Image (cartoon, coloured by chain):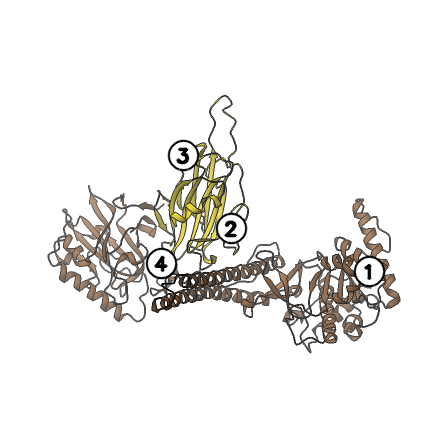
Chain colours: A brown, B yellow
Amino acid sequence: MTAELVRGQNHPLTGDRLEVRVAAERPVVAVATLGDADGAVRSRDRVAHPGSPVLPGLDVPRQPAAEHRLAVGLAALAEDVHRVYVALALPPAPAGPDRFGAFPAPVVEVAGPGGTPVVRYVLEGLDRESAVVAVELYRRQGAWKVRAVGQGYAEGLTALLHDQGLPEAAECAAEALRAAAGADGAAAGPPVPGEPAGSPAGAGSGGISYRHPGRQSTAAVATPPAEAGPADAPAPASAGPEAYRPVAGDATGWSMDERLYNQVWGMFEDLARSVAAYRSAVDFAEARLDQRLDEVLSDPRTRVGPAADAAREEARAQQAALLDQARSVLDRDLAQLAAEAEVVEHALPPAYARWDNPVWHAYQVPLERPLAVRLGDLRLPESDGLRIPMLVRLPLERGLWVDSGRPPGGVDPGLTDAGQRRRLAVECAVAVAARLLAVHPVGTYTVHVVDPAGAAGTALAPLREHGALKEAPAGARGVTETLERLTRRVDLAQMAVRSGVPDALPEDFDPAGQLLIVHDFPHGFDDRAVTQLRYLADEGPAVGVHLLMVADRAEARGYGPVLDPLWKSLLRITPVPDDHLADPWVGHAWTYEPPLVPAGSGVLDRVLWQVGQARRACGA
Amino acid sequence: MTVNLSKGQGISLKKADGGTLTAVRMGLGWQAAPRRGLFGTRTREIDLDASAVLFADKQPVDVAFFQQLVSKDGSVRHTGDNLVGGAGQGGDDESILVDLQRVPVHVNQIVFTVNSFTGQTFAEVRNAFCRLVDETTGQELARYTLDGGGPYTAQIMAKVHRVADGWQMTAIGQPSNGRTFQDLLAEIQAVL
C-alpha cells in the first residue's frame, strides 16, 4: 500500500536501502544534497549531482531524464548526515521548458527493499519554478522518515542550493547543470529514461539497481517521447497504447466463430463512431467559421479593412486547425482498425470470408451451421479502403432482395445497361445462395429456384450443374407447384409450433431450411402467386423458409402500393455498390458491396461441386 | 489512493507514468434520507439523474442523459437510469462512461450534472457522491462528496476539460435548480 503524501506530510521508512523514483513529463536533472543536524549543506562534497554523481550512500543519475531512480543506502551515509534532500532542476535546454508549470506535475516515489513504493508524492502547484526540493529523508530519533517538501525556486538551482546554506551555491549549480548538459549531449539519441548512464549496476558506494539488466521498464516504454507534439493533438499512432498489436478473435464469445463475429461487429461500431466524431467535428468547424465570418460582416466598422481581413484569416486558420486535428484522430483510428481488419480478415472461417480468401480453397462441407454468414462488405466514404464484413446471423431474420433496378443515387453510372444490371443481379443471387448452401451441413438446406420466363439462363448453371439443387429450376408451370408446396410447409410448421407439437409433422415434411430464389419477378407470376410470395416473405423466416428475390421494383409498379410491404420485409442488397444501409448506432449511410465471386475464379464451382458430392454421398 | 476533491479543486487525468487515461467513468451514488415522523421507516424514492453535456467552444453540442443514453458520436455513454437510488453503500447508482480518446476533437469540456428528477431537494438525500474512476483499471481517481445538501434540486458536479496535453477534471459543486440538465445550461455556461 503506497501512502499518498501531501505537501509537508511525513511517513516512516524501514530498511536501509531505498530507491527514490522520479517521473516527469520532460527530462529533469536530479540532485541530492546531504544536510547536517541543522539541515545545512556545508560544502560541495555534500552535493551529488551529474558532475559528481556518487557520494557515500548516494548515487544520482548522470544525465537529465524523464524518469530517474536514485539509490540511497541509509547505513552508508556519514554519521553527521541528518537529512538527504532530493531536488529536481530543469536542464538549461534551449528548446525545453523553463518552468515546472509548463508540464504536468512530476511524481516522486520512495521505494523500500523489494522495490515496493512506500510513499508517493505528486508535486502539484508548481508554476514559474525551475528547481524544486521534492522530498527529504531525515533522521528522527535514530529512525529515518521521509517528508514531502515541494519547495520550488523560480531562480533555479543556485537559489535552491544557496537556501540550503551552501557557500559556493552558484559554482556548484553551474557545474551540475553543465555536467547534465554535457551528458545529455554526449548521450547518443534521447536518454533512456530510468537508466543512470554509466552507472555500474549495484557497484560501489551502496548504489543498487533494482532493474533487470535485460529488461526495459514498462513505464519507460509507456512514456511518450519528450518532444511530444502540440498539446491537443493526440499521440501519433506509433506511441502509447496504440502500439498494441491486434489479434483475431479479440472479443467475447464461447467459440472462435462467435468471438470473430463479435469482433467484426465491434469494428463496425468503432468505425461508425469514429466517423461520427469526425463528421461532427467537421460540421462544428464549418458552423464556427460561418459564425465568425458573419460576425465580421455584421459590424459595419470592421467589415472592411485590414482588421477584417485578419479576423477572417484567423477564423479560417482556426477551422483548418480543427479539421487537421479531427483528421489526424480519424487517421489514427482508421490505422488501428485497418491493422485489425488485416489480421481478422485472414482468420475468418469460410462463412465470414470473402470468396477470394484462401480459406475457400480448403473448403469442406461443414458439420455445423455457423453463427452468421457474410452478405457483403460495408464501407464509408471516409474509411478509405477499409471494409467491414457485413455479417448477418443465421438463420436469416428475413428474406433477401437483390435489386436489379437502376440505383436511385446512380452510384455507379457506368452500369446503366439494364441487361448488364440484371445479369449482375443473378450472379449476386447465385453467389449468396451458393454461400448459404455451402455453410450449412449436408441436407439441412435446400435451394429452390423459380424462373418462369427462363430468363436467368446460364447464370444459374453453377447451382444446377453440380447437383447442389435438389430439383431443376421451376419453369412457368412449376411456379404454382413450388409456391404451393412452400406455402403448405410454412403453414404446417406454424401449426405444429403453435400447438406445441413440433414433432407431429407429416412424413414428407422437409425439415431443412429452404431458400426460394425468385427470378424475374413479377413477369410470369399471377395474382395468386404474388399473394403466396407475400405470405412466404412475412411468415416464412420464422419457420426457416426464406425468399431471395431478384427483382426490379420499378417493373412491379403495376401492383401499386400493395407490394410495398413485400419489399420492406426483405433485406435489400444490390449487385453494384450502393449506399443504402444504415448502421444501428449513428445511422450513417454505408456503401454496400456485394459478395461477388472474383472474375475468372473457379472457387464457386469447386465449392458447389463439393456440396453436390457430399449430398450424393449421403444419399440426400 | 484516491483524491478527495473539494470545491474548485482540479486533478490532472494523466497517469503517473506519463500515459494518458483512455476511459474514465463518472459514478454517482445516493441514498434517500430517512424521513422523520410517525412512519419513519417509509423511505421515499428519490430519482437523481446524472447527465454529461459536451461543450465545444462553450456551446453545448452533445449530451448523454437518461433520454439519450449514448452521445451521438458514441464517446460518452450513460449506463442507464436508476429511479430510486441505491443502498448508497459504495456502489454507483448511475454511471457515465467517457471514452476520452474518442471524444471528438472539437469537444473541449464535458460537464457532469446531477438533477433531482422527482423534485426533492438535496437536503433529503444522503451519502451522495460522485467519483471518477479509471475504467481500464477500476481505480478511483477522485471522489467528490455532496455533503451539506441544501435546498436545491440540481448540482453541477464537475467538468472534465482538455488541458495542454490531456484532460483535467475540476470539481465544481455549484448548486442549482432544475429537473433536467436543460434547465442548467445557463448556469453551466458560467462555469465553463
Q: CA distance from mark 2 to mark 4?
A: 25 Å
Residue furthest to the right in view is A477
**Distance from Cα at disc 3 to Cα at disc 4:** 36 Å
Q: Could you say whether the residue bearing mark 3 is in a helix, strand or loop?
A: loop
Instruction: Name the spot of residue B84 as percent of width and height, x first.
Output: 53, 36
- Numbered mark located on residue B77 in the image: 2
Taking the image as shown, residue B95 lies to the left or right of residue A196, namely right
- Pointers 2 and 4 within a single chain: yes
Q: Which residue is mark 1?
A: A530
Looking at numbered disc 2 in the image, what kind of residue is underneath it?
A: Arg
Q: Provide the secondary structure element on which disc 2 rests.
A: strand
In front: A388, or B190?
A: B190
Question: Which of these two is toward me, A60 or A149?
Answer: A149
B188 left or right of A463? Answer: left
The first of marks 2 and 4 along the sequence is: 2
Q: Residues within 10 Å of mark 1 (few under 14, many from 20)?
A: some
Whether residue A51 sits left or right of residue A283 in the image: it is left
Q: Are marks 1 and 3 on the same chain?
A: no
For mark 2, name the chain. Answer: B
Q: Position of residue A491 (x, y in %)?
A: 83, 52
Residue behind mark 3:
B150
Residue B90 x, y percent position in the rendering: 45, 39
Q: Residue furthest left?
A: A167
